[in-house]
Structures are given as C-alpha cells and as structure tokens.
Amino acid sequence: MNPKLSDRINAMATSATLAMAAKARELRNEGIDIIGLSLGEPDFNVPEFVKEAAINAINENYHSYTPVDGYADLKEAIIKKFKRDNGLSYQPDQIVVSTGAKQSIANLAMVLLNEGDEVLLPAPYWVSYSDISMVSGGIPVVIPTTIETDFKITPESLEAAITPKTKLIIYSSPCNPSGSVYSKAELRSLADVLVKYPNIIVISDEIYEHINFTEDHASMAEFDDMYERTAVVNGVSKAYSMTGWRIGYIGAPNWIARACNKMQGQSTSGANCIAQRATITALENPPSKIQYMVDAFKERRTLVLDLLSEIPGMKTNSPQGAFYVFPDVSYYFGKTIDGMTINNATDFSLFLLEKAQVATVTGVAFGSPNCIRLSYAASNADIKEALKRIKKVLS
C-alpha cells in the first residue's frame, strides 16, 4: 500500500483472472509451455459478417466522437434484440452503450450506491462485483452456496441476507464462474422475496445469455413487478467473441439509464465508433448465426467433465451455460504434493501453474474458497493436454 495513493485504490484487489493471465504470459516469455485455462475469452475468431461491418464503417469514414450513450441506430438494434430474445420492451432513453459490460456494471454501482449501502452477492460471483461495489462506497454481503445446490441461492438464503441497508443485488445467469443457470421459476421465487423490499435494485448480468445449454434463458426484468427495479447488463464480448471490441450495454428504468449516461459523460464518454457500427450488424443477425460456437462449447463441457471425473477429489456440478467448470478441490487441502503444501484453493491454483503448467483461477476471488475455475474456451487439444497434466501431478 502506498500512502500517497487514495484509500479506495489501496483497498482494491487486482483482478484475479487478469493477474493469473499476466503470470501465465510471464512464464511463457521465459519459454515455459503454459496452457491457459484462466481467461474467460472465446477462442473463436469474430464472425465474418461482423468484421465486414467494421471494415465498411471504416470505409464510410466513421471516426468522430460518438454520443455518450451510443449511436441512435445501435440503441434501436439493442431494443429489437431485447424484444426478440427476451420479450423485454425498452425505449431509447433506457439504453446506455458502454465500453464493455464491466463499465456498464461500474456505472450502475456508482450511480446507485451511497457509503455504507449493502450489496448482495450470491457466491460464486464474478470477481469484479465485489471491488466495483466497494470502490462505489458499498459493502459486499456474500450469500454462500454449495455445489449441492448447483451454486444457486434460495429464497430463504436471500431473505436471510437482506437488512435495512441492502441497496443492490448483483448476479449473473448463466453464471461466471459456475456455469449455473437460473430457471424462470427459480428467478420468480427470488422475485417473490424482493418485491417485499421495494428499495432493492437488481443488476442482472446476462453477458453469457446465448451460451446457454438449457435453451431457457430467463431475466428478472421479465416480471412486471421487477421490471422497474432491474437493470439488465449485456454485450457482445462472449457470444460474438468480440472481447477486445469493448461494447456492453444496459436496459434499465429511465432514471437509472439517465444517471449512467451522466456518469459516463464525465469518464469515458461514448464507446468506440467502429465497434458500435459492427455491433449493430451483430445484434441484427439472429442468434442462430453464432450457434456453431455454442455447440462447440457444449462439446467441450462434456470433454472437461469426463476428464475431471477421472481425477480423484475433483467434485463438480454440471454447468448449464457459459464456458467454465468450477470444481470443489477441498479434498486436496492439507495435503503435501511434490514438496508443495496445499492449504487452500489459491495454493492449489498456484500448484497447478508451477507443477502442471496449467493456468486456472482460485475460487477465493469468486467468493467460493473451496473451488477453482477452469475455462474451456480453449481447443480440444489444449483441454486434453491440460487435464492430462493435472491428473499426472495430482496422482
């Protein structure tokens, strides 16, 4: 901690996923053959129809500052996407386009939280929810789950976590890191609790919406009694493999969207012009155009689960979406293997990096200290080799 820096930045943790990716890059630069299963980044190329739209935008001389909340025709494409895929109706002043879904979530936290407000985080949660909440003045309140409940909270656990200071609940479905998917009935049961507490706002992170093996994506905003209290976050990074293009967006009640527009106007302003033009084309095309990626992820899920089942002590659920498995590895805690003592999931993740040359992420960063996250957004060959190495060092 540097006393010359602000308390907020000194208190903020470094993103565990980005830190592990950086460590893996360092080792690769030293000539070590590292297989990366740490980053949540599809290994597919951007679809050709999206790339062509970006090239056309360049040739059409799009280069100027963009509207803070996004091009009007992109917002219309987002509105049509919400209606087509989710049955949700929004107006243009309810849409804000940002530099990635992460900025969308940060905007929401900054405009909604006051000092001391509590933020409910069903664990496991995406690594940045906690620190985004804290830097915005909020206090994270973790709602623990177990692998036996498919890493999902229940109405009872939700209600037990609510206090007079509760302001937000942030969750993702499909979930990063567990791959769990809340059904419409499960979300309704949670909504039945939340309707009793009208001051609580919901942030529904749906960035993995299309990577859903249940074919039954549901949103809290679908319910009439939750629509005016729910901000839906989405983007094109995962479904369209456009991670570096940095386009995310929200659909939210007007008063929330206008506040996010105000916040963004004093920070980044509008998102990249070329990426916005390409996103219009991405969203105007039906999800069937990217089904080949979803099918490949589903096949890889089966491959990973089959290989993990051959390793003693690896306890897994069957993720229904996203591209992660989140095994409980507590079987290995307290054991010494190849000269390294494993006391927790962080030790286990570092053990795999050093001994198996496989990069994963500790579950501690996701609020689940018994687990690690493995991404199967990698080739079948890399997945097979990585699990072969892990099995070998653990045997």
Image (tube, rainbow, N blue to C red):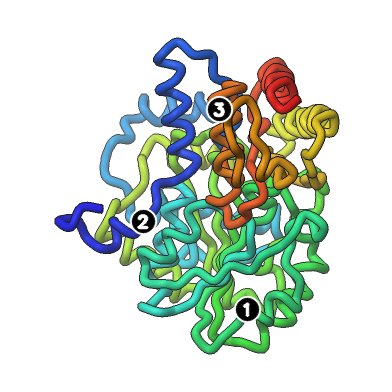
Q: Is residue 340 above or below residue 11?
A: above
- For label 3, the residue is 353
Query: Which numbered dot is residue 161?
Result: 1
Q: Is residue 152 above or below residue 256?
A: above
Q: Nearer the viewer, residue 15 or 60?
A: 15
Q: Residues within 10 Å of mark 1 (few under 14, many from 20)?
A: some
**Amino acid at circle 2:** Met
Quadrant for residue 336, please give it. top right
Q: Earlier in the sequence, mark 3 or mark 1?
A: 1
Query: Which numbered dot is residue 12?
Result: 2
Q: What residue appears at the point 54 percent right and 71 percent down from the top-left corner?
A: 141
Residue 221 seen from this side: yes
**Amino acid at circle 3:** Leu
Q: Secondary structure at mark 3?
A: helix
- Of labels 3 and 1, the one closer to you: 3
Q: Nearer the viewer, residue 293 or 338?
A: 338
